[in-house]
Image (cartoon, grey):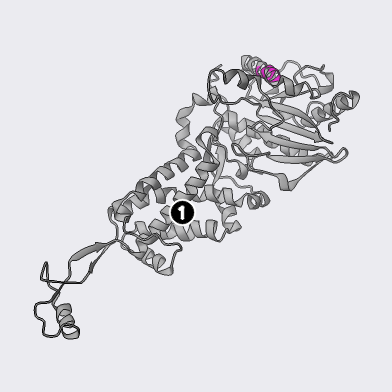
Amino acid sequence: MEREKLLTSEERTELIKSIGDGIETYLMGYAKVTQLGTLASRILEQHQEDLSTIHYLLNSEDFYSNDVKKILKRIDRSTQRRYTESRIPRAVNWPMTIKMRYSSAYGDTSRFVCSPPRRDYDLPQNQLVTYLLKKGHSLIQDYERQYPRTSKEAIDDEEESQGSKRSRTWLAKVDWIGDSIREDQKSPYLDDVTTPERVTPVMLTRSSHSRNRAYHKAYDTYCQEYEPLKIKNDLETLLDTVRHQALEPLSDDKLFEIHILFSVLRILRKSDEFEELEDERGLIAPGRDKVAVYRHIESGCIVSIYYDMSPNSLKPSHYLTAARKYRNRPSSRRPDIVMEIEHNGSMDLFCLECKLVRKDHTGFLYDSLYKCLGYLKDFQEVFNSCSWPQIGLAIYDKDVLQKTPPIKGLEEGDIPIMSRDMLSDNQYGIVQILQQKRYLSEKSSSVPVMV
């Protein structure tokens, strides 16, 4: 169902502010580079290597994509004289000829020293360029192994129709940088340039004093970006970088999903019933592990939060089994947020599907509810051993709902629907859903004991 307008600029700004307390951990593919303020230094420190690589490449986009090409067009070179003894094949270097005759071949007037001109590109400032190209290429290779094309992000049909937006994403920027580096490394001017293992003061001095101002960018890229982020591993530099350059969800649907995710994390963090296991806080990135982990203080059970990925407990899938009969590698389908609840070796699940349903999107509400029913059927073997409710639906506007029964007013088998404002409500919220699962699990001995 096509929805012409999702969020106004004011509504989008409001949601962006709501996720400012952890947006630096967001590395999903459909994101654009933006400026945000609030930082969580502990999370940055835990994932410093990943974040410093991504932000170094983004900061260096102009150097790798434009300045290196300017350098190669007017590359610095010197004309050296390489002396050979021969019978005048080309111009004679008379001072060296006389010196040679008096030092080693006195009296032999048949011997000459010639100095054929030769352009030499193996200069310190060019060595700095090859060093940065090599390091950039190595980081790109690591990035491509970590974010393979097939798993960078699951793209549903709605996002696929917005494919033109991909050119603005950070993934597209990094891909473009990688293509530029590979192209520049093939330049014949760099064939004879030594690639050093480390940068010397001479390289930096020559680069900063070169008449070609593009070399100044090589100096700045190394001193201001690569050295502090990748050699010194300076956390303060990374903090300052992310303060001015974070990744913001590009589509309104993705932004709403992240808003709901952060709302759930914030509610559990502030709840008196849960404590966050800080060492388990992770990046919000494709193919990564859990986003956060909480412990229920009274029961000791562990609640792990996953975003846009299926934990091992959410398998098998009837959909994948059927799809593999027709395609070798079908893309998987899973709810947006999965809460994995573990206690004494038993496992329970609660999934939350997030849909940007506005008050005039009644048809989309029904489609979203139907999708939740599809998940119940798809993962039926898993959900049969889980307490109710197994899945819920989070929407934007509560005005689309004519009735809003509380969690305790629903019957087993119903799908709880809550707006973003109801997530923290005492009757409808996420904590109440976990309490309901605990009540039912304690009531039935056939269901594992949960929260």
| Quadrant in the picture for residue 412 | top right
Relative to 96, say whether 245 is above or below. Answer: above
| Quadrant in the picture for residue 3 | top right
| Residue 373 within the segment the image draws in magenta | yes
**Nearer the observer, 434 or 10:** 434
Give the image location of residue 123, x and y in percent.
33, 64
The answer to whether residue 272 is left or right of residue 202 is right
Does residue 326 appear anywhere in the picture?
yes
At horizontal 47% and vertical 31% (from top left) the residue drawn is: 165
At horizontal 86% and vertical 30% (from top left) the residue drawn is: 449
The answer to whether residue 446 is left or right of residue 181 is right
* Residue at numbered disc 1: 135
| Quadrant in the picture for residue 127 | bottom left
Label 1 amino acid? Lys
Does residue 60 appear anywhere in the picture?
no
Residue extent of the magenta highlight = 371-377
The answer to whether residue 301 is left or right of residue 398 is right
**Nearer the observer, 410 or 286:** 286
What quarter of the picture does the N terminus occupy? top right
Give the image location of residue 351, x and y in percent.
71, 27
Relative to 247, say whether 1 is above or below. Answer: above
